Image (cartoon, rainbow, N blue to C red):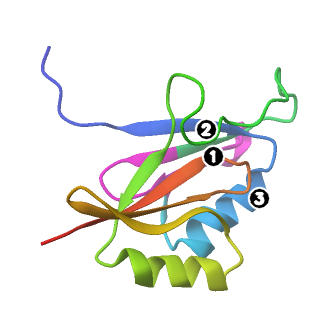
Amino acid sequence: MDLLATHHIAVYTPNFEAMEAFYTRTLGFPVTLRWDDAGIIFIDIGSTKLELIHKTQMAGTEPPHALDEGIGFNHVALHVPSTDAAYTELVKAGVKVLREPSNFKTVRIAFFSDPDGNVLELVEELG
């Protein structure tokens, strides 16, 4: 198999407008493709794309699991030049913080969530 890279991560959401605003306005990522008739947009989040899919009927009502819980996908990590600066911007924007900035091994990290409760991480590589 010849893999080129990741293409996208798909996220079902009943809160389509809030999720689009969060990723495009709050975090500043651009929309690269819209299929409005299908309720789908692709947002460039750096080295891959996030596919938001509008779902009005959700099979489960459980929110995504928090850090250190469950199995499977846990979070999406965003590489930033300064975790502290990015964290400060998110706090000012009213974003829900899950863990404040801290050093771990060779990185500085912080965790927050999007409007649906999906976990995102800020990662700064330390010297």
Q: Mark 2 or 3, which is nearer the eye?
A: 2
Residue 33 seen anywhere in this rendered image of the structure = no
Is label 2 in contact with label 3 (beta carbons under 8 Å)? no
Q: Earlier in the sequence, mark 2 or mark 3?
A: 2
Q: Is residue 107 left or right of residue 65?
A: left
Residue 25 vs 119, above or below: the answer is below
Q: Which residue is mark 1?
A: 118
Q: In this orientation, which residue lies closer to the viewer: 28 or 86? A: 86
Q: Is residue 89 left or right of residue 3?
A: right
Q: Is residue 93 left or right of residue 17?
A: left
Could you give the CA–CA distance between mark 1 and mark 2, rounded to whole angstroms?
Answer: 9 Å
Q: Considering the image in quadrants, where does the N terminus appear?
A: top left
Q: Which residue is mark 2?
A: 11
Residue 120 colored in magenta in the image: no
Numbered label attached to residue 90? none
Numbered label attached to residue 17? 3
